[in-house]
Image (spheres, helix red, strand yellow):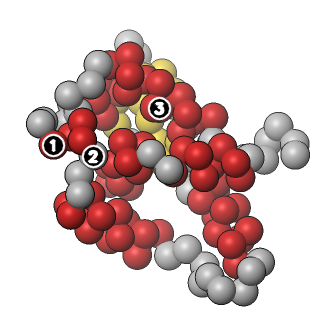
Amino acid sequence: MSHAQPNLDAIFAALADPTRRAILTMLLEDDMAVTDVAAPFTMSLAAISKHLAILAEARLITQDKRGRLKWCKLDPDAMRIASIWMQGFGQFDPVDLDAFERFLETELTADPAPEARNA
């Protein structure tokens, strides 16, 4: 697989973690500074940075520096690649990102990530 194309294993591994799914849900709304991403969680900034690095490696988010802050932005291209791969089985509809957002919000409201429960 080329360096420019997201790796399906990395995408699905990134999506397997509830904290990373919570972060993606937050980024559906708008770009966020790393410190703002970390705010609702009880884990350290270093731990959040590791989660963000995994999301960036899977190309689910991009990060850039704006002034003294590092900002995170959702990049739906990797999700589309995973969706296209799943469509190949003929059992899955294209990913509707609005429906995916509603699903994540419902999922996170029903069973929030353990780190976010104490926030």
Can you name the residue that lies furthest to the right here? 1
Look at label 3 and name its amino acid.
Leu
- Residue that label 3 marks: 52
Q: Are marks 1 and 2 in contact (CB under 8 Å)?
A: yes
- Asked if labels 3 and 1 touch by Cβ distance under 8 angstroms, the answer is no
In the picture of the structure, the residue carrying the numbered disc 1 is 117
Q: Amino acid at mark 1?
A: Arg
Residue drawn at x 38%, y 16% as measured from the top left: 46
Q: Amino acid at mark 2?
A: Ala
Q: Is residue 8 above or below residue 82?
A: above
The percent coordinates of residue 71 (x first, y second) are: 42, 30
Q: Which quadrant does the C terminus fall into?
A: top left
Question: In this rendering, does residue 27 appear at all?
Answer: no
Q: Residue furthest top?
A: 68
- Residue 59 is situated, as x and y percent measured from the top left of the image, at 62, 43
Real-space CA distance between mark 2 and mark 3, rounded to the nearest whole angstrom: 15 Å
Q: Is residue 16 left or right of residue 36?
A: right
Report whether 71 appears left or right of 43: right
Is 46 located above or below residue 25 in the figure?
above
Residue 40: give its label: none
CA distance for labels 1 and 3: 19 Å
Q: Nearer the viewer, mark 1 or mark 3?
A: 1
**What residue is drawn where x is 53% and y is 39%?**
55
Answer with left or right where residue 106 lies relative to residue 75.
Answer: left
Which residue is label 2 attached to?
Answer: 113
Task: Give how far across and how far down residue 57 sits, in percent.
Answer: 63, 34
Q: Which element type, helix, strand or loop, lies under badge 1? A: helix
Expressed as whole percent of the image width and height from the top left, the position of residue 27 reads: 38, 48
